[in-house]
Amino acid sequence: MMDNNDIVYELIVTVVDRGFSERVMDAAKSKGARGGTVLHARGTGSKEAMQFFNITVQQEKDIIIIVAPKDIRSDIMREIAIANSLEGGQGTGITFSLPVDSIVGLRKINNAAPAATLTDSDDKAAEQPVKCDAEGGKD
């Protein structure tokens, strides 16, 4: 079993109402996230279902997923929460993280940390995808 100290990356998942993904990404990038992926979804909770001309309409959601180094995860999540008023139980969204125990395909960009620990330091390695275990070592 993997020790929590072995985790190098975390997957940050944020669910907000449709249209707020840009605000989430701006907040995340301001704290060091490089990018993310936005998935469009539909809520299924009964509180979110509305009747409109006798048709049930579900609230549309954006799910933003971001892979980030563990050491900046808390800063990113805090900034997302502040920028999107998630704190205080206002019900406008949720953000949580999950440990990433292995990863394939991260690229080193402009010698930027922390991905720099995943590849060789020469320029050719800067554009090559790498496969890493949780310790950041190459397989």
Image (spheres, rainbow, N blue to C red):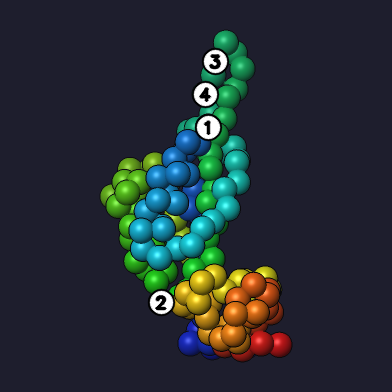
Q: Nearer the viewer, residue 113 or 127?
A: 127
- Specify the label residue 71 is tagged with: 2
Q: Where is residue 55 in the image (x, y as percent from the top left)?
A: 61, 17
- Specify the label residue 59 is tagged with: 1
Q: Tell me, yes or no, if residue 101 can be seen here.
A: no
Lower sequence index among marks 4 and 2: 4
| Quarter of the figure that contains the N terminus | bottom right
Density class for disc 3 (Cα within 10 Å; few <14, some 14-19, many ≥20) is few
Observer-side mark, 4 or 2, equals: 2
Mark 3 vs 4: CB contact within 8 A: yes
| Secondary structure category for the residue under label 2 | helix
Residue placed furthest toward the front: 123
| Secondary structure category for the residue under label 3 | strand
- Specify the label residue 85 is tagged with: none
Q: Which of 137 and 110 is in front in this view?
A: 110
Mark 2 vs 1: CB contact within 8 A: no
- Residue 61 is left or right of residue 1, and the answer is left
Q: Position of residue 108 (x, y in %)?
A: 57, 74
Q: Which residue is drawn at 60% across and 40% down?
A: 41
What's the distance in space between the residues labelled 2 and 1, CA to CA?
A: 34 Å
What's the distance in space between the residues labelled 4 and 1, CA to CA?
A: 8 Å
Q: Position of residue 72 (x, y in %)?
A: 39, 71
Q: Residue at x 53, y 43 (%)?
A: 62
| Secondary structure category for the residue under label 1 | loop
User: To which residue does mark 3 refer?
Assistant: 52
Name the amino acid, label 1: Gln
Q: Which residue is drawn at 57% across and 48% down?
A: 38
User: To which residue does mark 4 refer?
Assistant: 50
Name the amino acid, label 3: Phe
What's the distance in space between the residues labelled 4 and 2, CA to CA?
A: 41 Å
Lower sequence index among marks 4 and 1: 4
| Quarter of the figure that contains the C terminus | bottom right
